[in-house]
Image (cartoon, rainbow, N blue to C red):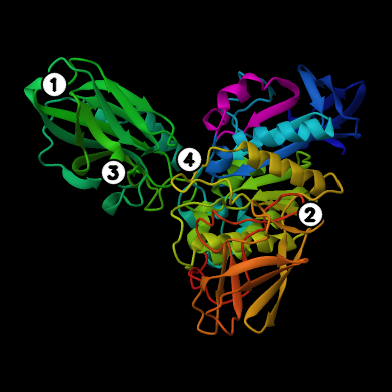
Amino acid sequence: MPIRIWGNADAKEIVNVTLNGISQSATTDKSGKWEIVLPALEAGGPFTVQVKGKENEILFDNVMIGDVWLCSGQSNMEFSLKGSTNARKTIRHSDNKHIRLFTVPKNIQTAARGDLPEGNWEECNPLTTPDFSAVAYYFGEALQKEVDVPVGLINSSWGGTDIETWTSWESAMANPVYMVHEGKSLEQAIGYSTRDLERYHQALRTKDKGMTERWYAADRDISDLKTCELPSAWDGELANEDGIVWFYKDVVLPQSVSGLSALLSLGSIDDRDVTFVNGIKVGGTNNCFFGRRYTLNPGVLKPGRNRITVKVIDMGVKGGFTGKPKDLFLEVGGERYSLVGKWHYKPSVLTSHYGLGNLGSGPNAFSSLLYNGMIAPLVGYNLKGVIWYQGENNTNRAYAYRNLFPLMIKDWRRQWGYDFPFIWVQLANFMAVDTQPKESEWAELREAQNMALSLPVTGQVVITDLGEAGDIHPKNKKDVGQRLAANALQVAYGRDSIASGPLYRSMELVPGKIILSFANMGKGLQAKGNKYGYLNGFAIAGDDRKFVWAKAYIEGDKVVVFNEALKRPVAVRYGWGNNPDDMNLINSAGYLASPFRTDSWSGVTQPTLYK
């Protein structure tokens, strides 16, 4: 592709750019903006780029020419390599000068920006990979081996975010929730600006009364403070707030704890914490993905009353103690003291104190806030394609996702001016396995993701075999990344290969049975792990719409589904649940069929309007 390079200089200044011996000049406009377009070049490097103006020049060394992929979404894309399965070994062997990494800083903006506040391209090596997106890394590693050109990975992701915040304000007008703001800017619609956000964030850094007034002191009187039940996300008066809130819990301990070390477990906290015991700081964590387990040195605890104080900083979305009750305890002298129950609390800095209303300051407060700060500055940078991993945050509005997902894809393509390949990860299996067939928000979201395959140059990877029932962030990111790479080779590079599983196409009713037909079978359908062709994960229903588990088997290139007790079946569902962990219908390439249903009956999210 032609190489676009742009920037800023003085008005009417002539800027010259040289890359690999090829030079091009441009004159800035009245606002100082300039842009040049160099001809397409063969992949390779390293090269030097010289940008020269009237009185100064900038040199960029170690520049590569290759394929750049934008990697975006929520927490499962943000999830760092150091937290994934076999991370130490992977990081130790991650040295590859032909892979370059760029992380877009988290940035909420109420108007589209042309620049990122900071960020650098980095070579892929054990120093740079630990905190980079695991999915993106494994994708790039597998892809680069196959295409044998330099690969650049831009990670622009933020955990716990809705798809609406990644869509431009222009396209948000196609969302019924935001249509009422037609003709207004986002700032006019939301009622505050980035400047207000900056005032609030400055307060987070410098105006926490809890620190200046020593709210962590062991003898502080907390008797008049309000109380809440923990563990819990912020609720009640804090439900729509972000900011800093201090929490207190007194624990009475026996004489035997004197001189003993201890373990304080607080479970998961969203987003950050600073923790004190009896006025002594014992720990602090800046990552919501990790549970809090702090070792208390001998002498910190004492017989009688002990004060646990936790400063919680919520940067957006939903704050608070988000872990499980079993993970909230103090352990000392072989005894475990539960910390579940009543805690006192006192807010220090809240979004409502700074004119941000009850929307909070987080990225989900309104449409387009992350598009403006984390996608808009990238527009124009030539991409080979996009990989996307998001949807968990939209499951309660899965029916709306049928429109919101393709709306965002088409929005980004329109902004860039061409239909780049767009490949996504379908939601993993999660939560408890259903003992009986039931409705499912997660299944409806997967269905919405399936529907987006109607857009051109798109791909999807199914990972309902990689999830973890008790963890929304499954650790196996290697298989996710490698499946994305295989899909990209087909969708973006034109490989004649099978890179995804069977897709349901049609059904035929016969007495007592339903016969299903599929596309994308390769050399045929198979039952993974069952040489007799028996399939798991199917449910069947009659006119009463009550689904029961079904028997299913492969017959030729079809799947036959039945239940002896059901004489007149009318509909089939496959993998329809939060955690369909036993799905085993695959094609000859070994890829799982996507969950699907043959009916179009109203689901649990269909009445929900867009949000």
| Residue at the disc numbered 4 | 195
Give the magenta-colored segment's residue range.
80-105
Indicate yes or no whether the magenta region holds residue 145: no
Q: Position of residue 515 (x, y in %)?
A: 70, 74
Separation of disc 4 and disc 1 at Cα? 51 Å
| Residue at the disc numbered 2 | 457
Earlier along the polypeptide chain: callout 2 or callout 4?
4
Instruction: Check whether the beta carbons of the residues at disc 2 and disc 4 lie within 8 A of each other.
Output: no
| Residue at the disc numbered 1 | 257
Instruction: Say what secondary structure mark 3 lies in.
Output: helix
Earlier along the polypeptide chain: callout 4 or callout 1?
4
Which is closer to the viewer, label 2 or label 3? 3
- Kindly identify the amino acid type of the residue bearing the numbered disc 3: Pro
Q: Is residue 177 visible?
A: yes
Q: Position of residue 469 (x, y in %)?
A: 46, 48
- Kindly identify the amino acid type of the residue bearing the numbered disc 4: Arg
Earlier along the polypeptide chain: callout 1 or callout 2?
1
Question: How many numbered marks, from 0 up?
Answer: 4
State the mark number for residue 325: 3
Q: Is residue 509 above or below residue 14?
A: below
Which is closer to the viewer, label 1 or label 2? 1
Query: Would residue 94 appear left or right of 544 to someone viewing this image?
Result: right
Instruction: Check whether the beta carbons of the residues at disc 3 and disc 1 lie within 8 A of each other.
Output: no
Query: Would residue 609 appear left or right of 77 to someone viewing this image?
Result: left
Earlier along the polypeptide chain: callout 3 or callout 4?
4
Q: Position of residue 355 (x, y in %)?
A: 38, 47
